[in-house]
Amino acid sequence: MLSLANGYARLEIDKDQPFVEVTESIRSLLQVCRLNQLAAALVVSRQGSFDLRSSVRVALKFVASRPLGLPPVRLAIVGLLADDGVLGALEKTADEAGIAAKTFSEEAAALAWLRPA
């Protein structure tokens, strides 16, 4: 589910959400940020490590390859059920795609990073 919050857009990915939907949802999240001139985006996933890594890596690479490019956005990715290795791999993929992203295991930490004092 995609929603707007104060200063950022938020995407929640369900445990059993189909791979294709995850990719499209992340693309939509970043498009919402572009259209609303939001500087931050939050992805909260309930997927297991393998599903999270696979779907989000494809999504990040796909979004980075589009002609419009990426909006200047900070992306926080929360993997509620993912291990540290998967989260690190997602940060590396985001970096390679030119996306300012950081991964977290808890949403509160991600929000603190998105909205620094």
Image (cartoon, grey):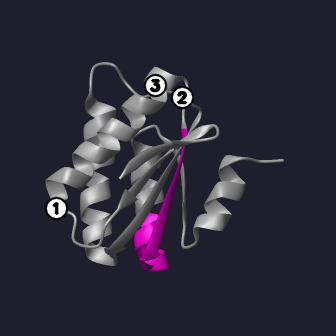
| Res. 116 mark | none
* Residue 28 shown in magenta: no
Q: Residue at x 63, y 37 (%)?
A: 7
Q: Amino acid type of disc 1?
A: Pro
At label 3, counting other C-alpha atoms closer than 10 Å, the crowd grade (few under 14, some 14-19, many 20 or more) is: some
| Real-space CA distance between mark 2 and mark 1, rounded to the nearest whole angstrom | 27 Å
At label 1, counting other C-alpha atoms closer than 10 Å, the crowd grade (few under 14, some 14-19, many 20 or more) is: few
Which type of secondary structure does the marked residue at label 1 adopt?
loop
Horizontal relation, residue 55 to residue 90: left or right:
left
Question: Which is nearer the N-term, disc 2 or disc 1?
Answer: 1
Figure check: 18 above or below 16: above
- Residue 20 position in % (x across, y down): 15, 52
- Residue 53 position in % (x across, y down): 31, 66
Figure check: 52 above or below 34: below
Horizontal relation, residue 113 to residue 33: left or right:
right
**Badge 1 is on which residue?**
18
The one nearer the camera, 63 or 108, is 108
Horizontal relation, residue 32 to residue 67: left or right:
right
Q: Amino acid type of disc 3?
A: Arg
Question: Which is nearer the N-term, disc 3 or disc 2?
Answer: 3
Q: Residue at x 44, y 22 (%)?
A: 35
At label 2, counting other C-alpha atoms closer than 10 Å, the crowd grade (few under 14, some 14-19, many 20 or more) is: some
| Res. 34 mark | 3
Q: Residue at x 57, y 40 (%)?
A: 8
- Residue 64 position in % (x across, y down): 33, 34
Q: Which residues are magenta?
A: 74-89
**Badge 2 is on which residue?**
72
